[in-house]
Image: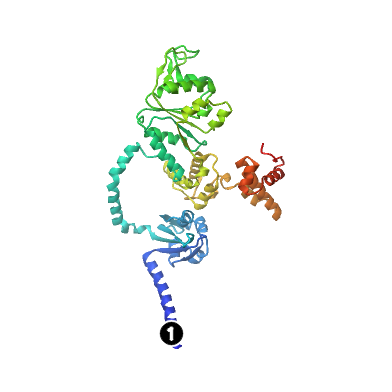
Amino acid sequence: MENVNDNNNAQSRGILNSETDFYRILETLYDDFTIISPEGIIESALPSFESMYGIPIEEAIGHSIFEMEERKIFDPCISAIVLRTLKPATMLQHTGNDNYLMCTSIPIFNDDGSLHKIISYTRNAEKYEQLKDEYDDLQNTLAAYSAELISLRQKLNGETTIVGVSPRIQELVNMALKVAGFDATVLITGESGVGKNLFVDIIHRNSKRSGAPIISINCGAIPEQLLESELFGYEKGAFTGAGSGGKAGLIELADGGTLFLDEIGEMPLHMQVKLLKVIQEKKVMPVGGLREKPVDFRLIAATNCDLAGLIKEGRFREDLYYRLNVLELSIPPLRQRKEDIIHLVSHFTKKFCEQYGVSHTFSSGAIDCMESYDWPGNVRELENIVERAVLTCDDFTITEKELPSHIHTDELQLALHSESTSLKGILNSVEKAVLVKNYEKYKTTTGVARALGISQPTASQKLSKYLGKDYQSDK
């Protein structure tokens, strides 16, 4: 019996010694080593934590990494990024005691694929010299690819200006590059602010007409009474006030290049007839002219309107629609590709920091807010928000507090913070917010019922109750 106890004690001592040795090895290899739970709670760290981050280890264990980021102990918090993306990451991190650390964070998964832990380890940035040999090897490897990169850039006539990793955006970029080599007409559709002009730029720059001009015409910005003379030009004396030498139209100026008709859905019907003739015959008749002029252009049109709906309303010609819609690129709104938001934020942050000579980064909380927002103004709205934050933030890290209130406050949040103190009142506020938000999205009680998993009569009854209108019918 005594031998058994001795063996058990020896095994226990062996386990403890192994654990001690494990941490000693970690201290030798890394300046800091932190283990974080799937909920973002710091579970353990090496004794060097205080010297690395400026606070006692007791203030970190059991606390959230988001709290650490808010206090600028981790600035920014790389583990928060890994918690959101579930992908390893390495970046420079500023600490609470003004250290700069090269921090790496890695997710560890269970057998079922769920997140088990996040481990984070650091090295002092002053030790970069130790990586010089590896850096030189990397530079040599990159140099081996330089010739191929130059060839690809020449092929594409410059880098793609589209930022996005979503499958749909990648598919659209590949399609734009593919159709660029042909002279077929392209119709680009999508909501305002999604970046239709960027796809026009890709197509023109990678076409055989890239050396010629691209003439852009906003069909909704030119007054209707001036549109014909602006598009087709005019001859001397064609009308009162006409220049003495006449004037070439915008379509004529696109000869040999690309003609881009933006907001084509805004073009008046009588002009649609004349435009159709130009597209079919590739000839233009100036106002007051007697002879048509041949023009050679590649046509790209764009709109944020539902052209098929305009045809039904008699506001757009069906024959012109089919002339324009040879190849269609339909750009999805930002709310349908939210995986692109973090990349767009990074792109615009870098752009504006370089432009204004400042240094900022967005916190994970701010990114979460932006990913939860629907972005009715799409990429253009996101760009404006990032520029505003970069210009107005006084700290290195831009948090959700620096974002406009409408970005991180929606109807549901307002309902949860309503003045009502009773459970019934709070639940009614939340129910109303959810119903109204879904009705604004789907426009019908049938759509609301389908989205919320309730019957259509129930959806109608509740909407009538909260909004004081008759929602018994979708008509």
Q: Is residue 165 above or below residue 67?
A: above
Q: How crowded is mark 1: few (under 14 residues within 10 Å), some or many (20 or more)?
A: few
Query: By what rule are the colours in the image chosen?
Result: rainbow
Picture residue at 41% right of the left edge, 77% below the top: 14
User: In the current view of this chain or complex, which residue is farthest to the bottom?
Assistant: 2
Quarter residue 200 falls in: top left
The percent position of residue 220, horizontal first and vertical second, equals 52, 27
Q: Name the residue under label 1.
A: 6
Instruction: Tell me if 462 is positioned left or right of 162 in this view.
Output: right
Q: In front: 283, or 403?
A: 283
**Image quadrant where one finds the C terminus:** top right
Q: Is residue 12 above or below residue 34?
A: below
The percent position of residue 131, horizontal first and vertical second, equals 32, 57
Residue 48 seen anywhere in this rendered image of the structure? yes
The percent position of residue 49, horizontal first and vertical second, equals 44, 64
Q: How many labels does the image show?
A: 1
Amino acid at dot 1: Asp
Q: In front: 155, or 222?
A: 155
Q: What element carries label 1?
A: helix
The percent position of residue 367, horizontal first and vertical second, equals 50, 49
Q: Is residue 190 above or below residue 88?
A: above
Q: In front: 63, or 313?
A: 313
Instruction: Tell me if 458 is positioned left or right of 267 in this view.
Output: right
Instruction: Tell me if 446 is positioned left or right of 219 in this view.
Output: right
Picture residue at 47% right of the left edge, 29% below the top: 324
Residue 56 seen anywhere in this rendered image of the structure? no
Picture residue at 71% right of the left edge, 40% below the top: 470
